[in-house]
Image: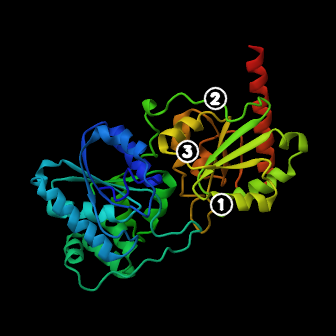
């Protein structure tokens, strides 16, 4: 069950596609038509289509946290699955949040067909914003047949868990925690935070026993073509690629400040290409910061072209989110890391100390909010690239 799935493109759809490819088996997929909300990337669908036996796309207005939308996806999804024959033909159902709809549909399959193994994956902690504060969601409806069916199937402690909050996201966590056979987290710190959210040691211990850590998969080798030539012909330049949005809470404001601290001779040898869908806004930000001689704004790329282009850079920049209020350093691991590793390019990381990204040990590295350490990491990247160029010229 994959509410967001190719050809609609974002991090969740990419991860789902990579999971399917990593399994290497034929699957049936139920997903949502996200026309108008997510851009299409047919190259991504082309990569995963050899593994798709049936792909049902559900119509309707997509809404992130509205019970009518969750109920519609669940009822229509069940109708599509049942139309092709009894659900006893399935041994396993998989679902992933975010979006939350996937877990609700998978839970209904599990409730109606308990023999089916349910594997539920979480991308990030559901109940928290990045800064650690409570992520609010609408209250559960008072009277709904689909919801009543799901709630009756939950073990009593999880019904109590829902009564204590009564919000939509509490349901999305309780359903897989209470009913799924396997719980998948992308990193250890994420699992710690989500188990703590239960507020009950016995429930947490039982859930942990059914859990596993499975980082975002890297793209299969055959997805990654040989990279094209370097994006700049000047061999003295250090070329850094960044793919995504210029989020303020991911340290890129500090990057622009660090660029201004570089000595002129290093700054003149540094180029950072930002590939983003928010070109106009990003260009205005770069101009305001006075670093348009270093940072170039480029268009977002289809997934296959991204995998190819990314490998042409000396370094690929990845940044932690700046977090707070958690019992761990940082439960969020950027999914882009797995794509970067697939390209075999060097990763330049801006990290929260002790985070999962920090534990990867990429070099150069800097603290996400420390302008001086970012300046030093950029200087190191420029120096390393120069050494590589001289070595290449000598051979």
Give the farthest residue toward the top.
395
Task: Kindly identify which numbered label has been placed on residue 280.
Answer: 1
Quadrant occupied by the N terminus: bottom left
**Whether residue 48 is situated above or below residue 183 in the rendered picture:** above
Residue at numbered disc 3: 337
Res 382 → quadrant: top right
Q: What is the x, y in percent for residue 234?
A: 77, 31
The local secondary structure at tag 3 comes to: helix
Judged left or right of residue 352, residue 134 is left
Q: Position of residue 341 (x, y in %)?
A: 54, 37
CA separation in Å, label 3 and label 2: 22 Å
Q: Residue furthest right?
A: 264
Q: Where in the figure is residue 150, as x and y percent of width and height?
A: 23, 71
> Toward the viewer: 156 or 393?
393
How far is mark 1 from mark 3, CA to CA?
25 Å
**In front: mark 3 or mark 2?**
2
**Callout 2: SS:** loop
Q: Position of residue 154 (x, y in %)?
A: 24, 70
Numbered mark located on residue 306 in the image: none
Q: Is residue 290 above or below residue 52?
A: below
Label 2 and label 1: CA atoms lie apart by 27 Å
Q: Who's the residue at 19% across and 62% down the image?
A: 78
What residue is disc 2 on? 229
Say which residue appears at 36% left-offset and 68% top-offset: 62
**Quadrant hosting residue 103:** bottom left
């Amino acid at each position: 069950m994959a509410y967001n799935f190719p050809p609609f493109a974002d991090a969740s759809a990419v991860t789902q596609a990579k999971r399917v490819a990593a399994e290497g088996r034929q699957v049936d997929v139920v997903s949502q038509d996200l026309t108008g909300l997510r851009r299409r990337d047919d190259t991504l669908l082309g990569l995963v289509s050899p593994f798709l036996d049936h792909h049902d796309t559900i119509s309707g207005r997509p809404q992130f946290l509205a019970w009518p939308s969750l109920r519609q996806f669940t009822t229509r999804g069940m109708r599509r699955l049942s139309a092709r024959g009894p659900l006893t033909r399935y041994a396993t159902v998989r679902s992933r949040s975010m979006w939350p709809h996937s877990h609700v549909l998978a839970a209904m399959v599990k409730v109606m067909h308990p023999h089916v193994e349910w594997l539920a994956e979480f991308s990030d902690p559901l109940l928290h914003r990045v800064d650690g504060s409570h992520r609010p969601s609408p209250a559960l409806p008072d009277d709904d047949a689909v919801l009543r069916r799901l709630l009756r199937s939950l073990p009593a402690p999880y019904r109590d868990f829902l009564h204590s909050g009564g919000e939509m996201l509490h349901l999305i966590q309780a359903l897989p925690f209470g009913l799924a056979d396997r719980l998948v987290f992308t990193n250890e710190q994420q699992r710690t935070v989500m188990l703590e959210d239960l507020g009950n040691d016995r429930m947490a211990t039982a859930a942990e026993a059914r859990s596993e850590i499975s980082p975002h998969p890297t793209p299969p080798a055959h997805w990654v073509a040989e990279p094209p030539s370097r994006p700049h012909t000047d061999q003295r330049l250090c070329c850094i690629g960044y793919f995504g949005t210029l989020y303020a809470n991911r340290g890129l404001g500090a990057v622009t400040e660090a660029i201004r601290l570089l000595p002129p001779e290093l700054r003149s040898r540094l180029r950072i290409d930002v590939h983003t869908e928010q070109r106009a806004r990003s260009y205005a930000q770069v101009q305001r910061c006075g670093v348009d001689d270093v940072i170039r704004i480029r268009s977002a790329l289809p997934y296959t072209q991204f995998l190819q282009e990314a490998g042409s850079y000396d370094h690929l920049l990845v940044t932690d989110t700046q977090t707070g209020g958690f019992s761990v350093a940082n439960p969020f691991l950027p999914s882009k890391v797995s794509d970067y590793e697939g390209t075999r390019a060097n990763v330049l990381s801006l990290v929260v100390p002790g985070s999962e990204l920090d534990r990867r040990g990429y070099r150069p590295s800097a603290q996400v909010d420390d302008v001086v350490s970012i300046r030093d990491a950029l200087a190191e990247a420029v120096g390393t690239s120069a050494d590589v160029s001289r070595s290449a010229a000598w051979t």
